[in-house]
Image (cartoon, coloured by chain):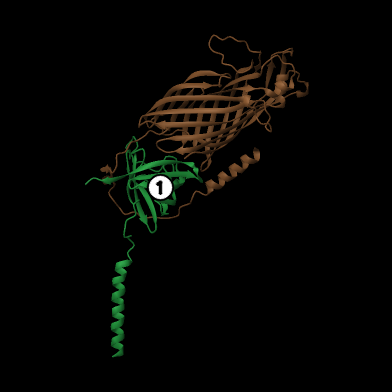
Chain colours: A green, B brown
């Protein structure tokens, strides 16, 4: 009899555990972080999709105004300092990585990659409103840097 | 000064080394990129042209350089009872430090503050035999320039922009350990408006109050930056100050052929003090050099670039005036004295921190 009660208690606990696990354990945050989405860079020549991975955020180039060279071949990361990456297509390239939400609409500790010169810069992103990002790439200290304004865009239905 | 510069570059290397190495890996899901071509803006967007064209050489945030000019001769004109004198110069040399810090740098405005320190020292043969006081001050003190400058680039829209630049420099024969005097201050300014025709071409037209020809002058200025469609060749010009044809070996190696018109007006207070009873208000040296040259610039390590220059120093003007004034067209006030500096080869090297 005792053995049956023990079994029932175990089943009950396992059931409660499963329900709780499904209720509070998913990786997806309850409210999606506002930085996640599709952004157009200041020049209007590229669009970057920002996503989360773990506790961090990254972005990749998903659209280029000029995705090919004049001869029709696909643009690649030809200026990368790592020779093995110079044939990687720019479309789909991860150009933002490592950003941590520090609160107050600031995302820090990340880097931004500039395919035009093959350099990676420290970067701080500030969300000035729901649809605008101030993306500042800099060298070492923020003074040696440049800020670009990115605007949120959405897919047409 | 030297220790400060070494410390500064040490800090910069440390800063550059601190650019985070991101070892994160992220696996994006497969998706159809063509969908991202069909989007709509969430807010109205006004775009502005940038201050650069594609392929333009990187701008220098901090630059530390050394200039060396080969042997030459000089004939110093006679003045105030001193006789004309010929002298041989072993070489000229000088440090060149410049910082250009972007205080505001965003898509709507670029405002930068700069600092400059240049010196030009003269090493004479038989310097103990020099009699002409002008040659003595060149030997004992050299010529120096230090000052601040401010540059503003304001895009008006996607096509048009205005650019203004002003510098406040002390020029004179003050020594490196001497503070310059207020009467050695010279102000230069440039204003221009222009158009960024497309990603590879921009031009501008304006006016400049400058000392590049040695004395105060008003020049029309023409800015032209262009990169040819093959992205290998380009032109970088701000006439009449400088112009270069650029060949891009790759994003980290650039070769230039061109010229620079380099000049200033120097108040020679030490010469005035050392020579009693001169019948002048002040001595103002009008120096200008035309320098055709070839330059090779390359990335040494990340954002640290090296620039190596070889060229010819053609002396355009090295004359002395009685005090500072504007020699307007039609004003034929004679110089106190004219000096003839012969031309020679020169070379320069600089270490630079370049901008993102």
In-image side of A16 versus B220 (left or right):
left
Residue at the image point whose x is 46% and y is 38% from the top: B104
Q: Residue furthest right?
A: B128
Residue B340 occupies quadrant:
top right
Where is B277 relative to B156, above or below? above
Q: Position of residue A26 (x, y in %)?
A: 32, 64
In-image side of B239 versus A89 (left or right):
right
Q: Of helix, strand and loop, which one carries label 1?
A: strand
Where is A127 relative to B110, above or below? below
Residue at the image point whose x is 51% and y is 18% from the top: B218
Q: Is residue B116 visible?
A: yes
Front residue of A122/B309: it is A122
The chain holding disc 1 is A
Q: Position of residue B143 (x, y in %)?
A: 65, 26
Q: Position of residue B97 (x, y in %)?
A: 59, 34
Q: How many marks?
A: 1
Q: Residue furthest bottom?
A: A1
Where is B233 relative to A15, above or below? above
Q: Is residue A86 visible?
A: no
Residue at the image point whose x is 70% and y is 22% from the top: B271
From the image, tell me which residue sits under label 1: A126
- Label 1 crowd (10 A; few <14 / some 14-19 / many >=20): many
Where is B265 relative to B299, above or below? above
Quarter in which the N terminus of chain B is drawn: top right
């Amino acid at each position: 009899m005792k053995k049956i009660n023990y079994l029932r208690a175990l089943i009950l606990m396992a059931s409660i555990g499963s329900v709780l696990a499904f209720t509070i354990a998913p990786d997806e945050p309850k409210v999606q972080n506002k930085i996640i989405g599709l952004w157009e860079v200041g020049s209007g020549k590229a669009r970057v999709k920002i996503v989360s991975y773990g506790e961090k955020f990254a972005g990749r180039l998903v659209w280029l105004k000029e995705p090919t060279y004049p001869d029709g071949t696909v643009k690649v990361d030809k200026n990368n300092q790592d020779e093995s990456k110079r044939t990687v297509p720019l479309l789909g390239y991860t150009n933002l990585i490592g950003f941590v939400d520090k609160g107050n609409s600031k995302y820090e500790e990340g880097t931004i990659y500039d395919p035009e010169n093959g350099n990676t810069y420290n970067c701080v992103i500030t969300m000035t409103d729901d649809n605008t990002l101030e993306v500042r790439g800099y060298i070492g200290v923020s003074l040696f840097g440049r800020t670009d304004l990115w605007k949120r865009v959405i897919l047409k239905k | 000064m030297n220790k400060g510069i070494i410390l500064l570059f040490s800090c910069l290397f440390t800063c550059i080394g601190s650019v985070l190495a991101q070892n994160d890996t992220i696996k994006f899901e497969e998706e159809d990129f063509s969908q991202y071509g069909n989007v709509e803006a969430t807010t109205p967007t006004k775009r502005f042209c940038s201050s650069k064209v594609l392929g333009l050489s990187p701008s220098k945030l901090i630059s530390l350089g050394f200039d060396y000019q080969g042997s030459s001769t000089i004939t110093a004109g006679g003045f105030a009872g001193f006789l004309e004198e010929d002298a041989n110069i072993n070489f000229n040399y000088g440090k060149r430090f410049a910082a250009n810090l972007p205080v505001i740098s965003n898509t709507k405005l670029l405002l930068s503050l700069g600092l400059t320190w240049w010196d030009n020292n003269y090493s004479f043969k038989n310097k103990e035999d020099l009699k002409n006081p002008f040659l003595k001050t060149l030997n004992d003190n050299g010529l120096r320039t230090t000052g601040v400058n401010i540059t503003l680039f304001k895009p008006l829209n996607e096509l048009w922009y205005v650019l203004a630049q002003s510098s406040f420099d002390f020029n004179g024969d003050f020594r490196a350990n001497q503070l310059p005097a207020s009467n050695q201050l010279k102000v230069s300014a440039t204003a221009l408006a222009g158009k960024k025709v497309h990603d590879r071409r921009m031009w501008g037209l304006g006016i400049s109050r400058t000392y590049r020809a040695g004395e105060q002058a008003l020049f029309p200025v023409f800015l032209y930056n262009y990169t040819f469609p093959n992205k290998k060749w380009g032109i970088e010009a701000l006439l009449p100050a400088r112009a270069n044809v650029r060949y891009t070996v790759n994003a980290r190696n650039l070769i230039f052929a061109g010229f620079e018109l380099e000049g200033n007006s120097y108040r020679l207070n030490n010469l005035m003090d050392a020579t009693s009873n001169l019948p002048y208000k002040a001595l103002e040296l009008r120096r200008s050099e035309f320098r055709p040259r070839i330059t090779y610039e390359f990335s040494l390590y990340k954002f640290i670039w090296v620039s190596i220059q070889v060229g010819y120093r053609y002396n355009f003007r090295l004359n002395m005036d009685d005090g500072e004034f504007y020699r307007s067209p039609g004003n034929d006030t004679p110089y106190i004295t004219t000096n003839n500096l012969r031309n020679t080869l020169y070379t320069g090297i600089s270490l630079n921190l370049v901008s993102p």
